[in-house]
Image (spheres, rainbow, N blue to C red):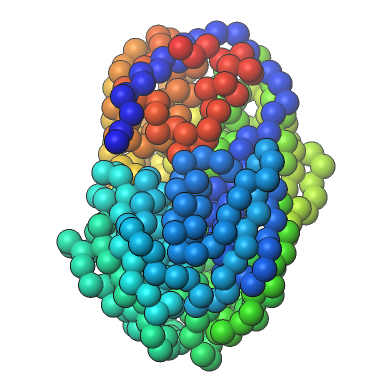
Amino acid sequence: MRADPTPLTARRNGPLAGRVRVPGDKSISIRALILGALAVGETRISGMLEGEDVLNTAKALQALGARIAQTGERKWRIDGVGVGGFAEPKGTLDFGNSGTGCRLALGAVAGCPITATFDGDASLRSRPMRRVLDPLERIGARTLASENGRLPLTLAGARDPVPIVFEPPVPSAQLKSATLLAGLAAPGETVVIEAEPTRDHTEKMLAHFGADIRVEDLRVETDNRTGRRITLAGQPELVPRPIMVPADPSSAAFPLVAALLVPGSELILQGVMMNPLRTGLFVTLGEMGAAIERLEERNEGGEDVADLRVRSGPLRGVEVPASRAPSMIDEYPVLAVAAAFAEGTTVMRGLKELRVKESDRLAATAALLRGNGVAADIEGDDLIVHGQSRPAGGDVVTTHMDHRIAMAAIVLGLASERPVQIDDGTFIATSFPGFVELMQSLGAELS
């Protein structure tokens, strides 16, 4: 049952200052749970994001037979069942708002000879699943019940999974990952060919757990881009390995942009993941003139991380190429807020994938800006923002149950002329538990 809406208001105050670590990366946390559940033996995870998306994924994996327990603050233990070893759940697997958890678990279940029903909240039910089901059905799974390829759906896993060669129709790390997770149970080699590289956390973590996986760069001759060919040898015995979850760059984006926009601010964000396939926002903000400095660059748990020092300062409008979208797909709402304060026009190209997120994020982002006095246009799949020195603010933003729209609106309210209110802050906890308290600790005025 959905909790009562919790409105939240952000208003201008003094500078933001402090040193903080945002919660662990959601993509890594969910993948660590799933691969730990598919390993044989005990996997220990530290730095886990304990947001609702991750917790709902953990509950679903428990229903599939994995033993999962919290052992301390952001510390978890998983006793896995092995590849193909999931048990048939007694009830429906409820993923709440987690598209990542649901789609990746569909892949993991597709390689097991069991039947499971997948469901989620109203937002997740509205999101398409057909693109994920297509490669899973080629591997041997069957969709027994679904309305228009959406949740709730019932999937019968493959009794004799077969390896496939799959070329995703759109750049999508979730689509790629679901296919690879299903391919774990198939004999021979499962191959995914990407025309455009997407975040590679699944490939790195599969290798971390002992899978035989190869990643090769491919030149796409038609438009001189570099794609990737990922080859996974099936039926491995995954070996438990400890996982240290780095701080989530998608979550770090909100205090980072707030610090850029609120005059006099200076923050240090600790241990933020610097995987090149996740740093599109930082690259773009650098092109806009943002003062972002990397400190103490290092490697933790197979991922590059760094502390980021951020100082407020002027920004300028830029053109963001469509090729950058996979590396920052979740950060466009808060980038649009930064663009609203920049001098000149910012053009963000190729945002089709935003239309099938927790909300139609493309439309929701434009509405967020327009409601607060910022000129914004949508042309095809492009978002065009006409910046100004300080937007008026003053709107009550409809979040559409979307945590990233909610947080982007809060960031705008911290630097706009008038306060900005969101209709419901409840869903922020899906990816960033403690967001309000963290921002308040830095000096933000939220109520």
Q: Would you place residue 15 above or below residue 305 in this image?
A: above
Single out the residue that lies furthest toward the front: 90
Based on the displayed image, in which of its 4 quarters is residue 340 positioned?
A: top left
Which residue is nearer to you in this view: 205 or 409? 205
Which residue is painted at 60% across and 50% down in the image? Answer: 69
Which residue is painted at 72% across and 36% down in the image? Answer: 270
Which residue is painted at 44% across and 59% down in the image? Answer: 63
Q: Would you place residue 305 above or below residue 374 in this image?
A: below
Based on the displayed image, in which of its 4 quarters is residue 163 positioned?
A: bottom left
Single out the residue that lies furthest toward the bottom: 188
Which residue is nearer to you in this view: 302 or 333? 302
Does residue 145 appear anywhere in the picture? yes
Based on the displayed image, in which of its 4 quarters is residue 263 positioned?
A: top right
In the image, residue 33 lies at what x, y percent?
57, 57
The count of marks equals: 0
In the image, residue 84 lies at what x, y percent?
50, 77
In the image, residue 351 lies at what x, y percent?
37, 50
Q: Would you place residue 165 above or below residue 217 in this image?
A: below
432 to the left or right of 153? right
245 to the left or right of 175? right
Q: Would you place residue 393 above or below residue 75 in this image?
A: above
Which residue is painted at 38% across and 85% down in the image? Answer: 159
Does residue 315 appear anywhere in the picture? no
Single out the residue that lies furthest toward the left: 147
Which residue is nearer to you in this view: 104 or 254? 104
In the image, residue 333 lies at what x, y percent?
42, 37
Quadrant of image for the N terminus: top left
342 to the left or right of 80? left
